[in-house]
Amino acid sequence: MEQFEHKFKIFSCRGSKYFAEKVAKALGTELGKSEVTAFADGEFQPAFNESVRGATVFIVQSTFGPTDNLMELLLMIDAAKRASAYKVIAVMPYFGWARQDRKDRPRVSIGAKLVANLLHAAGCDRVMTADLHADQIQGFFDSPVDHIYASAVFLPYIKDLHIENLSIASPDMGGAKRANAYSRILGVPMIICHKERLKANVVENMTAIGEVEGRNIIIVDDMVDTAGTITKCANMLMKKGALSVRAICTHPVLSGNAYDRIAQSAIKEFIVTDTIPLKEDKDSSKFTVLSMAGIFADVIEKVYHFKPISDTFVF
């Protein structure tokens, strides 16, 4: 009998093809062939144009602009399982719906748990993602989750800047754990910005806890949506005597007037990753984009060969 060969294939949904191509290049391979048939009413049907029987299939898709991208990912997973794939792994650089990780008021959904259930129901055997909005979302899954930290690309970049009188800031109390990890590794002080939010996406008042005057500050966040909080934080820190303010965030969602707010703010440099692409028709002169593709490629290779991935995690 011919010896069984464990095959490896990587595919992309439409929303993250730019990222998947970089991952495939880093792995020394090419993206698998697939297509999407669109119907007049907005419905669509993905299909694989090559065999995936017996293969470990990695499907790359971030769920920004989340509804269609999520649905396409679910359909691709289902198609792979029905085509007799050995394992199907969802590579989700940005995991949308992650802000809905708890029932914080009556009669609301827990969207992150629902998405985890949908991925499981579709046939997903494993999930890879970066900087979840809350670490405990991993517990929503009944399958393994490889939670990759963007600090692996941010920390070397920060160190190469050789900034004197550096402090790390969290834009709110919820991000204090992340900011503390950066400040501990870099050996610099931490600042916490405390905000009062009257309703979603609207910040009313903000103050800072920690020494601000005479410091060069980097604000650390996992995602930025409207940029209201992070720009208000940067402006407040400059008014309190900061020498400069930079910001880093893993997932540049950047909805509405976010680009304009950042351009008009006191932020000197906005450092992001490529889990979500920047909009080409917006002012991105302040942005520096660091790629996560190499790290994802490394984790994919290790998972495929059943190697440990613990050395990938910075914290």
Image (spheres, rainbow, N blue to C red):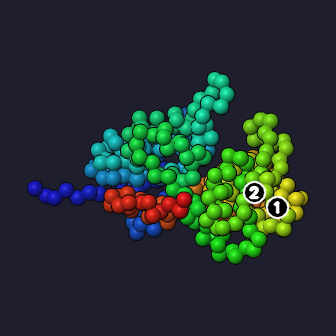
| Quarter holding residue 264 | bottom right
Residue sticking out furthest to the left: 1
Query: Is the residue marked by circle 1 packed among few (<14), some (14-19), or many (20+) residues within 10 Å?
Result: many
Against 19, residue 194 (above or below) is above
Q: Is residue 175 left or right of residue 199?
A: left
Q: Quadrant of the C terminus?
A: bottom right
For residue 263, which quarter of the picture? bottom right
Q: How far across and how far down the image is residue 303, in percent?
A: 37, 57
Name the foreground residue: 121 vs 303.
303
According to the picture, the residue beneath numbered tag 1 turns out to be 212
Q: Identify which residue, 286 or 39, lies in the foreground.
A: 286
Give the residue type that dot 2 points to.
Answer: Ile
Mark 2 residue crowding within 10 angstroms, few (<14) / some (14–19) / many (20+): many
User: Alpha-carbon distance for marks 1 and 2?
Assistant: 8 Å
Q: Amino acid at mark 1?
A: Val
Evaluate whether residue 234 shows in this view: yes
Give yes or no for contact between labels 1 and 2 (Cβ–Cβ under 8 Å).
Answer: yes
Q: Residue at 46% across / 35% down in the picture? A: 117
Q: Residue at x 57, y 32 (%)?
A: 110
Closer to the camera in the image, 167 or 108? 167
The residue lying at 45 percent from left, 68 percent from top is 26
Residue 27 percent across, percent down from the top left: 42, 66
> Is 15 placed left or right of 307 in the picture?
right
Q: Nearer the viewer, residue 254 or 191?
A: 191
Where residue 184 appears, as percent x and y from the top left, is 63, 63
Q: Secondary structure at mark 2?
A: strand
* Residue under pointer 2: 191
